[in-house]
Image (cartoon, rainbow, N blue to C red):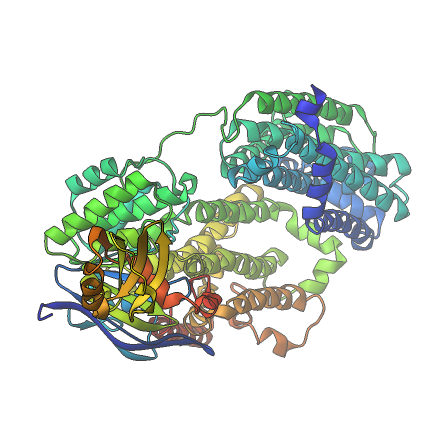
Amino acid sequence: MFEQYFMKTGSLARFILRRDRIRIPIWLISIVAITLVVAEAFTNLYASETELQAIAETMLNPAMTAMVGQGYGLDNYTYGAMMAHQMLLFTAIAVAIMSILLVTRHTRTDEEDGRIEMIRSLPAGRLSSLSATLIVLISTNVVLAIFTGVGLYSLGIESMDWEGSLLYGSALGATGIFFAALTALFAQLSESSRGTIGLTMGGLILAYLIRAIGDVTNETLTWFSPLGWVLRSEVYVNNYWWPITFMLVISIVLIVASLYLSAIRDLGAGFLPSKPGRKHASPMLQSPLGLSYRIQRTALLSWAVGMFILGASYGSVFGDLDAFFSDIEIMEQMLTPMEGFSLTEQFITMLMAIMSMLGTVPVLMAFLKLKGEEKKNRTELLLSHAVSRTKLIGSYLIIAFITGFVMLSLAAIGLWAASVPVMDEPIAFSTIYGAALVYLPAVWMMTGIAVLLVGVAPNFTVIIWLYLVFSYFVVYLGGLLQFPLWLSNLTPFGYIPQLPVEEMNITNLTLLTLIAATMIVIGAIGYNKRDIEG
Amino acid sequence: MGRLSILQASNLVKRFGRFTALNGVNIEVNKGEVFGFIGPNGAGKSTTIRVLLGILKADSGEAKIFGKDAWKDAVDIHKRIAYVPGDVNLWPNLTGGEVIDLFIKLRGGNNKSKREELIQRFDLDPTKKCRTYSKGNRQKVALVAAFASEADLYILDEPTSGLDPLMERIFQECVQEAKNTGKSVLLSSHVLSEVERLCDRVGIIREGKMIESGSLGELRHLTRTNLYVETIRPMDSLASLQGVHELVKEGEAFSFQVDSEHLDNIIQYISQFGVTKLESAPPTLEDLFMRHYEGTSKSANSGAGGRP
């Protein structure tokens, strides 16, 4: 009986570890390293008691509560309390995503691609693959808990004691195990790997939203969210272990349910009915433009929501900003006070640079999809119809341009909308919107380089990503690390006038636009002349 | 042939770096004709087709379809052709029905009834997402989209790979119907029986060169006929005659192959021994094909993978 279900589970677990021998360590190292680096950085950022207390004040802001959770231990805001309050939730989300992706990879994805079928045809038990996956994931999360706990304690920060550090790690590990179990369950319900990821990511977002709403309005509601339990452990202040225990118990229930469902279902089947898709294409879809939008719709809409939320979360802290900045040394290094402008206004210029570069990511993705399609041999199919290459590349360009405009607009609108209620003297919408849209020529310039690469050197498109990362470092860290000026002149983002603090510079904007246009034309000509690969 | 030429390629040369994929390919497809394009993997079939589609640019040579240049006038030409690749890659998040509509629309036709009819004949569920389709089903999507369009030339690159025998039959019917309405077809295939059944003319490509081209009758003429003979008196010196190959004695009977030009002599010789049974079979395309590749299979396989 046992053999029937669990034969070879051990070998399969080792096989999973072998397949993920790079993937899992990268996740673990990144999560532990970021945790330790941030903990260490807090002690440098906030050197005095008063600074810590000033931060504690801002945590009472409902926007902050919604974002990071209800504050606790605020009257004596130690480094430990601050770490647990500001970092634990976000790290837990990262751990949850790790678990979701890893479990889906070894359950539904393998099943979809026919690999589970191969394994089932061997003398392996019916539940062996699923059990092996769960064993690997539980071990991974236990290792994560131990490393994080020991690591935090070994930093030797006074308020981060042994029990709290271990609890911090355990909270992360338990979240990971919980979401691994939840993914295992959803992998039985959904028929596809996309469906599985969709359901669990949806669950994660829902858990975050329920906690956010609950924390601001009604505490009972928070209890319906696993992310709410994480924060209820009140690490480094009260060190409650029972929310973590509770989480593990629920995980066991989920695991048993997933094993049961897996045992009674057919291979390849799911319990949620897959609904039939459209029989006909809508008129919207029936053109290269419609197609290129349609195949990236989900990604673009997610980015749009993300940019709005990003803008809004920056905007929501604007109320306390001036008080906040004057307390923090590092910010003063980045923003030298200027006559006639508030620190908030100066902060806007830095935010806009960062948000415009983040907003460039979906723009480049939207255009480079053209290259991805070519690699997958689908461009060939399209071009065998009455579709010219100019029309094809044009369609992707249009999507890229609209994406750039929408991303910057949404970030600016989000920023403005969230800042108005929290500021005594709100900044005018036109000021914020102008400061954002002035970055469009830089975005076009990046797009132009991408077009040039796709048209002339399609095997080197990765250059544009490296260039964007370079720009980000130069612009973001340039002020802080006192980079020489010529470095920031190497990126188009360095030529954009920083509204509202700087003067408008029409010449720079026009030049950027012209160079971008030239590169687009050359790229398009190249694309018309070269072989389509595949 | 004297008939209207639809597709004409002469001396196509295509290099990928140091590798010469096409080394002087010539093809001619006439109106109302099904042209079979055969050759092993890596011989250059797909590369030729992609040059004809204007997806690859030939280094030299000329490719004309409907009298227009395959590279320069690609879009114009594509309004009147339908293409089915051997390995159909579709968008995982679109349904089969959506892809078919998209393709029909992009070509510029709109034949709703034909679409429905073909979906039924090929037994395709158009409401499923492409990611759930098997290889055969993805192939069906491309075939439905191709045959639902009112194209004048069909370019089919191993279109039946992954189809079951029933669907292969449907496919052959579709090609036949297209031919009956005066359409032309360029069919690249590994299924030699299919080529034999459908094609009026055949071209054989090897290592980027056309090594044989003509009607099946013409090609057969160049080769051997299979004979099976029983005679009253034993034929003692059959083996020593010119033009006899692969002689096998089966009891009192002999089976062997005869070079076409020696057929007359051999028959006269046999008739002296009192023929009780005589069976003759034309060489199959497979015989033809194998004859061209025997002894060359090693080099012919070197470019396997089919795509550059």
Residue B270 percent across, percent down from the top left: 22, 60
The picture places residue B95, in percent across and down from the top left corner, at 35, 40
The answer to whether residue A394 is seen in the rendering is: no
Name the residue nearer the viewer: A87 or B219: B219
Q: Which quadrant would the C terminus of chain A be assigned to in this image?
A: bottom left
Quarter location, residue B136? top left
Q: Which residue is drawn at 30% across and 61% down?
A: B257
Q: In which quarter of the image is residue A92?
A: top right
Q: Position of residue B42 (x, y in %)?
A: 42, 65
Q: In this view, does A481 lie to the left or right of B247?
A: right
**Quarter of the image containing the N terminus of chain A?**
top right
Q: Residue furthest bottom?
A: B60
Decide if residue A487 is in sight here: yes
Q: Which of A261 and A6 is in front in this view?
A: A6
Indicate the position of residue A363 as horizontal and vertical percent values.
46, 58
Give the residue at x 58% y 42%: A422
Name the residue at the front extreme. Answer: B233
Q: Is residue A411 left or right of residue A370?
A: right
- On screen, residue B31 versus residue A36, left or right, reads left
Residue that appears at 43% across and 42% down: B131
Is residue A192 positioned above or below A154 on the image? Answer: above
Q: Nearer the viewer, residue A427 or A527?
A: A527
In the picture shown, does residue B108 fall above or below A1?
below
